[in-house]
Image: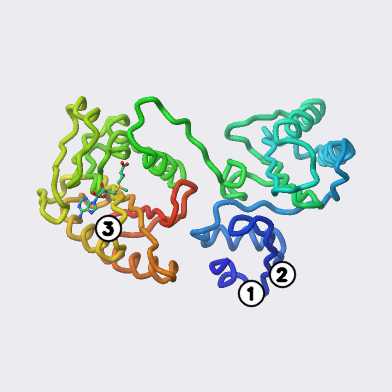
């Protein structure tokens, strides 16, 4: 909220789900609002949907009827490419239908109109948020809504041999920053244990040097492309220009982490990428982020800072060495 307040004068907030979802009213039109978000995407905003229509909830089949009518009248849009229907509900809403039921009905209407529906990689999204007594309905592309997952809540399937849930963070970063991990060759993973990130990098075909005083999961011993150093990162040194990717997920004091990353920067080639989590330990997260970023910017260029769905009290930075 603070980020948006600083960005848009006269913005008004109404909370829909405490600490999670809010409605904003802004003295801007849709294009102006989208342009502002594109210009500098807020770190803590994962998803936004326009409110093109507000439908009062009746609590019976009339609600589905009203949504179907709304879709029919927006016919032109369904001819523009595949559409996904996203529905989210506030607890206690009087809207009686599940996301699956609503989707089934609206998918049928879109198909009847000659449109195409999809779950994955849609060209446009019809987002419906069921509040206590009103449905907020809006259309947009995934880029405009900042995510192609309902509410930005991207979910990955847990695999049987997965070492840690932390792996989801790097998987999400890969998508959020359009990173294509398989295009890198030689990675340094600082704060690697138990090894979820290292596992993903190895699976993507990279050679990995992992540094952590704690034990890596024994499963990782099966990878010949892994060099595991059971050490504190401040006690290891590498030849200049060894790595083209640095990842660091240390859950440590942000400024100490930044200092340590800078110490390792010589080991990176020019143009090397870095994916780093920043723990937000203090009350002033925006200030902490500013301090850490300005320290790292002595060597790196910041490409994007985002609180990912799988980040808790932290954010993830994507940087490139100058
Ligand atoms: C959140 S865990 C990392 C999880 C890991 N990314 C994964 O996917 O499994 C943080 C790790 O950072 C390590 N760590 C903290 N300070 C460190 C330092 N100075 N040098 C190396 N590792 C450190 C801790 O031992 C711990 O294993």
Residue 206: x and y, percent? 25, 34
Q: Secondary structure at mark 3?
A: loop
Residue 52's place in the image compared with 10, above or below, is: above
Dot label at residue 78: none
Q: Which residue is depicted at the point 28% across and 52% down?
A: 250
Q: Cα distance, mark 2 to mark 3?
A: 39 Å
Mark sitting earlier along the chain (1/3): 1
Dot label at residue 9: 1
Viewed as shown, does residue 296 lie left or right of 3? left
Residue 263: x and y, percent? 17, 59
Mark 3, residue position: 322
Viewed as shown, does residue 293 lie left or right of 101? left
Mark 2, residue position: 27
Q: Secondary structure at mark 1?
A: loop
Residue 264's place in the image compared with 62, above or below, is: below
Q: Which residue is depicted at the point 17% across and 47% down?
A: 213
Q: Nearer the viewer, mark 1 or mark 3?
A: 1
Sort mark 3 into few (<14), some (14-19) or many (20+) by Cα contacts within 10 Å: some
Q: From the image, which quarter does the C terminus lie in?
A: bottom left
Q: Cα distance, mark 2 to mark 1?
A: 8 Å
């Amino acid at each position: 909220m603070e980020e948006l307040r600083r960005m848009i004068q006269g913005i008004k907030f109404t909370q829909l789900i405490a600490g999670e979802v809010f409605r904003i009213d802004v003295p801007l039109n849709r294009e102006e609002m989208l342009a502002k978000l594109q210009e500098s995407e807020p770190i803590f905003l994962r998803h936004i949907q326009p409110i093109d229509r507000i439908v009062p909830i009746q609590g019976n089949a009339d609600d589905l009827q009203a949504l179907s009518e709304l879709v029919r009248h927006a016919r032109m849009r369904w001819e523009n490419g595949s559409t996904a229907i996203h529905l989210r509900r506030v607890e206690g809403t009087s809207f009686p239908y599940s996301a699956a039921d609503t989707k089934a009905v609206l998918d049928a209407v879109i198909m009847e109109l000659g449109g195409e529906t999809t779950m994955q990689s849609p060209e446009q999204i019809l987002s419906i948020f069921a509040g206590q007594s009103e449905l907020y309905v809006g259309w947009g592309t995934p880029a405009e809504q900042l995510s192609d997952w309902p509410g930005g809540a991207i979910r990955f399937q847990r695999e049987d041999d997965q070492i840690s849930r932390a792996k989801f963070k790097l998987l999400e970063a890969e998508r959020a920053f359009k990173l294509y991990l398989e295009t890198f060759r030689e990675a340094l993973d600082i704060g690697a244990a138990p090894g979820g990130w290292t596992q993903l990098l190895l699976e993507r075909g990279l050679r990995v040097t992992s540094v952590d005083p704690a034990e890596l999961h024994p499963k990782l011993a099966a990878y010949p492309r892994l060099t595991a150093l059971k050490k504190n990162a401040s006690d290891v040194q590498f030849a200049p220009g060894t790595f083209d990717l640095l990842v660091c997920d240390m859950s440590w004091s942000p400024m100490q982490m930044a200092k340590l990353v800078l110490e390792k920067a010589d080991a990176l080639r020019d143009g090397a990428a870095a994916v780093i989590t920043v723990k937000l330990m203090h009350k002033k997260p925006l200030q902490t982020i500013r301090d850490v970023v300005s320290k790292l910017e002595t060597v790196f260029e910041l490409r994007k800072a985002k609180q990912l769905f799988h980040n808790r009290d932290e954010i993830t930075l994507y940087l490139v060495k100058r």
